[in-house]
Image (spheres, rainbow, N blue to C red):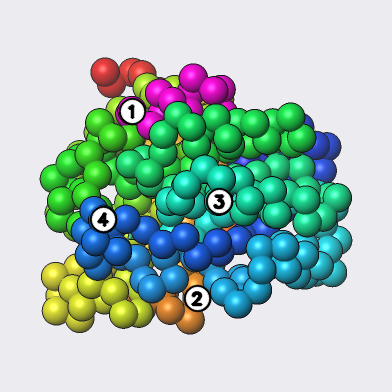
Amino acid sequence: MTRYYSINNYLKKIFNKRVYKVSIDANLGCPNRDGKKAYGGCIYCDKNGSSSRTQEKNLSIRDQVINNILIRKTRYKAKKFICYFQSFTNTYANVDYLKKLYDEAITAHPDIVGLSISTRADSIDEEKVKLIASYRKYLPYVSIELGLQSVHDKTSILTNRHEKFTDFLKALDIINKYKLHSVAHIILGLPNETYDDMIKSADIISKLNLSGIKIHLLTALKNTILEKWYKEDKYIPMQKNKFIEIATDFIERMPKDFIIYRTSGSGYAKDIIAPTYIYDDKFQILNEINNLLIKRNSHQGKLFNIFC
Ligand code: SF4
């Protein structure tokens, strides 16, 4: 039994079995890349827009879903699935077009039980949240995932994110108004962030009305600004032990009912320049975080609220 409340534990409680995500690339682009907000995107984002690249862009949404489900059924004997709009900014279009995409995904296979939309806070408004919330009529699990990465605006500027923490808070208020699952993505090891900066992020995030968090380790992918910084020694990847320690410190500060969606790096394995351990040791890292919690005689929530 893990000492943190993992997404697998949560989904098993709801569905009585493991539920698998199927990634979708809707080719929606991003306002932080196409000039509406900025050009070039976040320093760590590659041309695939933070995709796991398990899908092919030339496939329809329906075919991406069916192919991914088939792979998981064959490989893992999976029975239930969540459609996960993962790449780029998945609310960056008008509501009618978004509805068409989401409808196509959730009707592609009878074993779909959830819908998860990953996006930027500045690309969400009430009309879009209302649309996403409408899928609860058909699906037991519907969530919106927002890239926050850090609560510190100085980091957002340095990483070329072009969003403020207040943008995130405004979007979260709308999501909570419609009582949807809300997930914040955060990144550990961002340039110029000290240990205290990361722990401050943890303490602030722990007080928000969120369903859970995804903890990523900053990774330099091929053909990104971060790759250039890495080659120029302007970005030093976090050592594995340090990442495990800080991710564990982070989890200890989260309330017990926050779902921990993920604790690892992002990116397609072949595109990761550094640190490569994050891909090789993905499951080992999860075990090591749990082992460290055991060694500390600790658990998620142990340090929630006691320092502020
Ligand atoms: S907001 Fe997301 S998709 Fe857009 S550039 Fe940043 S990481 Fe990439």
Question: At 24% from the left edge and 67% from the top edge, which residue is drawn?
Answer: 40
Rendered location of residue 121, percent (x, y): 36, 40
Q: How many marks?
A: 4
Task: Locate residue 228, reporting x and y percent.
Answer: 20, 78
Please give the residue where the numbered disc 3 appears in the rendered image.
97
Figure quarter occupied by ligand 1? bottom left
Write down the residue under mark 2: 269
Crowd around label 2: few <14 · some 14–19 · many ≥20 (10 Å): some
Q: Cβ of disc 3 within 8 Å of ligand 1?
A: no
- Tell me, yes or no, whether the two marked residues, 2 and 3, touch with CB atoms within 8 Å: no
Tag 4: Cα neighbours inside 10 Å, few (<14), some, or many (≥20)?
few
Is the CB atom of the residue marked by disc 2 within 8 angstroms of ligand 1's nearest atom?
no
Q: What residue span does the magenta drawing correspond to?
A: 169-182
Give the residue at x 25% y 31%: 166
The span from disc 4 to disc 3 (Cα, nearest Å) is 19 Å
Q: Quadrant of the C terminus?
A: top left
Percent x, y of residue 14: 76, 32
Q: CA distance from mark 1 to mark 3?
A: 24 Å
Marks 4, 2: nearer the viewer: 4
CA–CA distance in space, label 4 to label 2: 30 Å
Q: Is residue 124 left or right of residue 103?
A: left
Q: Secondary structure at mark 2?
A: helix
